[in-house]
Amino acid sequence: MSKKIVVRFIAIISICLLVTAMYFWFLTHQKSHITSQTIHIPNGAPSTAIAHLLEDKHIIPSAFTFAWLSRLSGQAAQLKPGLYHFEGKLNMQDVLVILTKGDVLQFKVTIPEGLRTDEMLNLLSSRTKTPLSDWHTALNNIVGDGEFEGLFLPETYLYSKPIKPQQMLQQMFDMRKKVEDKLAQELGWNATQIKRNRIIASIVEKETALPKERIWVSAAIHNRLKKNMRLQMDPTVIYGLYLTQGAFNGNIRRKDLRADTPWNTYTRGGLPPTPICNPGAESLRAAAYPADVDYLYFVADGTGGHAFASTLAEHNANVRKWIRIERKMNRHKN
């Protein structure tokens, strides 16, 4: 073979390689408009299968090119599973970055303050469309046969699909612990004092829906405990009835107040043995830092809040006002 032929052959090969490289660069860098597309990358899917999924959804123009791009960049084994959303102007490089970073779709679920743990699990199951049994299994894995009430911080949490119940519950458990650890550090508490505060916070959470009242309700609880007065707080009665009877219709009666359970603060002194709900961070803090007032009593005032009192005479006057308001409200209903 003559030298001239060899030179021509090398030139042709070089041109072909250059053209191929330019075409490869064009395919991988040319941005195309992607209409709203959601795709689920299964766990353990190889890069070639992922490439074909992307091509089928018109997210990339060539599965073959994408597979080679992921291999040449050394990222073929780093494509993360999950639910992804693609939209707008993207090229293959952009898609590769999204998959290697694991920028999966994020969903929100908000847990309101004051739910019992069973109510919380029902809400999580409903909002995330996952079996309730999965949440009970996760709860059992975290707390075992131990106490389960008041251990999870109500908050708004982000999750990706498919959701991992144990991972989310553990996050909620850890967030509650973080709040309590901070209070314990500030006040020099031990484990017993932390639990005591959690119980008080759960009662505060159930007694008022107004943020400004939390420290006043907390003060009333602390003051009654100091005077060895029974707390006589309806939410504790309701919780005990729910645990012992399996249900509560929402209308508390005199006989309910006399129904003795470990949580009934009308029939028993001191605090209940466990929290009665999952309190939020603000209630945990209010329980730890009650207002510097001498309140011992409070009753609904007809505005959604409460009238607080330091003496029984003042409280009885507030009760009479509430009874008049309640009667007037009932007349308007009828």
Image (cartoon, grey):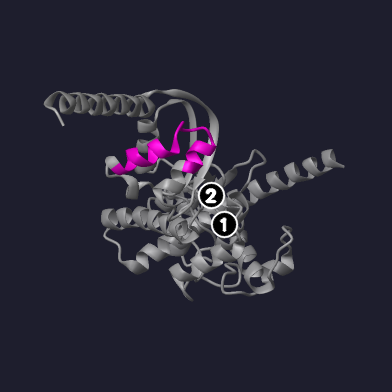
Quadrant placement of the N terminus: top left
Q: Position of residue 259 (x, y in %)?
A: 68, 73
Magenta span: helix, strand or loop, mainly? helix
Check residue 252 for magenta coloring.
no
Seen from the viewer's position, the closer of residues 278 and 59 is 59
Check residue 68 for magenta coloring.
yes
Quadrant placement of the C terminus: top right
Which comes before the other along the chain, label 2 or label 1?
Answer: 2
Label 2 sits on what residue type?
Ile
The stretch in magenta equals 52-71
Disc 1 residue crowd, few under 14, some 14–19, many 20+, Cα 10 Å: many
- Is residue 109 visible in this depiction of the protein? yes
Q: Position of residue 102 (x, y in %)?
A: 39, 44
Mark carried by residue 120: 1
- Is residue 292 visible in this depiction of the protein? no
For residue 61, above or below residue 196: above
For residue 212, above or below residue 251: above
Q: Residue at x 55, y 64 (%)?
A: 134
- Residue assigned mark 2: 111
Disc 2 residue crowd, few under 14, some 14–19, many 20+, Cα 10 Å: many
**For residue 194, which quarter of the picture?**
bottom left
Which element type, helix, strand or loop, lies under badge 2?
loop
Label 2, label 1: how far apart the Cα atoms are: 7 Å
Left-right relation of 141 to 68: right
Q: Are marks 2 and 1 in contact (CB under 8 Å)?
A: yes
Q: Residue at x 67, y 41 (%)?
A: 302
Q: Position of residue 79 (x, y in %)?
A: 37, 46
For residue 277, above or below residue 318: below
Label 1 sits on what residue type?
Met
Q: Residue at x 25, y 25 (%)?
A: 12
Seen from the viewer's position, the closer of residues 131 and 286 is 131
